[in-house]
Amino acid sequence: MNQDELKALVGRAALAHVPAGSIIGVGTGSTVNCFIDALATQPGLVRGAVSSSVKSTERLKAHGIPVLEAAEVESLPVYIDGADEIDHAGCMIKGGGAALTREKIVADLAQRFICIADESKLVATLGRFPLPVEVIPMAAAQLTRRFAAIGGQARLREGVTTDNGQLILDVSGLSITDPLALETEINQWPGVVTVGLFARHRAAACLLGTRDGVRTLTF
Ligand code: 5RP
């Protein structure tokens, strides 16, 4: 199976984690696209979805799945999303698709985060994938210096404006041995909208697509 087939496999496997008749949270990315397409094969399984991006909203609506605003729900039973990296504690790097802020907002509404990913995303230590950070443009230069001070090289993602009208810095060179501490630290830097470390909002489970089938990791 190639990577796309592994993504399709876990996209379909995630259906088993969707409570019938519920409103669920839906993430962003190519793996989530497979999940949305799988969801569309089960009309009426969900009452609706809260989406983490304009792209996912468009795909959900194209399939006739109702999309609700985050403000319309108080809680979601489950949030299903991909990751750029996930470690053995369920902490993740996210934001490769620039949707990290809305992803964290929807994840915060959910009782359980279920990560769907192909096996290439599982790592011992987070940080080989450059850490996405959504920032206010005015602060981009000083945040670049702050990252340099902790050993990170921040690069502005060229030509990208987020759904929230902000910029993305991609920070390489960080070996993230304590994701929760680093997330907490970066969250305090003025001008940071969201850091793409999901430690406070780590996954409860990961459906990992492997050549031997779906491996379920629980944390
Ligand atoms: C988007 C994300 C995605 O979940 C992450 O980039 C993984 O994407 P894909 O499923 O395409 O590999 O965080 O902001």
Image (cartoon, rainbow, N blue to C red):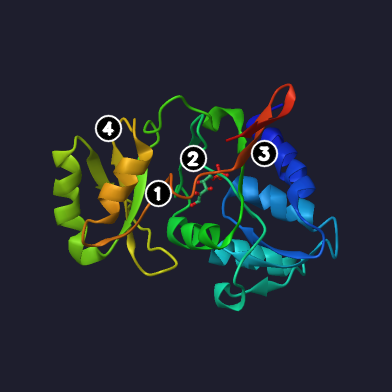
Residue placed under numbered mark 1 in the picture = 196
Residue placed under numbered mark 3 in the picture = 7
- Quadrant location of the C terminus in the rendered image: top right
Q: Nearer the viewer, mark 2 or mark 1?
A: 1
Q: Earlier in the sequence, mark 2 or mark 4?
A: 2
Marks 3 and 2, how far apart at CA: 13 Å
Q: Earlier in the sequence, mark 2 or mark 1?
A: 2
Marks 2 and 4, how far apart at CA: 16 Å
Q: Earlier in the sequence, mark 3 or mark 1?
A: 3
x 59%, y 75%: residue: 69
Q: Residue furthest bottom?
A: 72
Q: Earlier in the sequence, mark 3 or mark 4?
A: 3
User: Do the residues bearing badges 4 and 1 touch, measured as CB atoms within 8 Å?
Assistant: no
x 37%, y 42%: residue: 180
Is label 2's Cβ within 8 Å of ligand 1? Answer: yes
- Quadrant location of the N terminus in the rendered image: top right
Residue placed under numbered mark 2 in the picture = 84
x 61%, y 51%: residue: 112
Q: Is residue 62 visible?
A: yes
* Whole-percent x, y for residue 68 in the image: 64, 74
- Mark number, residue 173: 4
* Whole-percent x, y for residue 67 in the image: 67, 72
Amino acid on which the number 2 mark rests in the picture: Asp
x 20%, y 44%: residue: 147
Above or below, 117 relative to 69: above
Marks 3 and 1, how far apart at CA: 21 Å
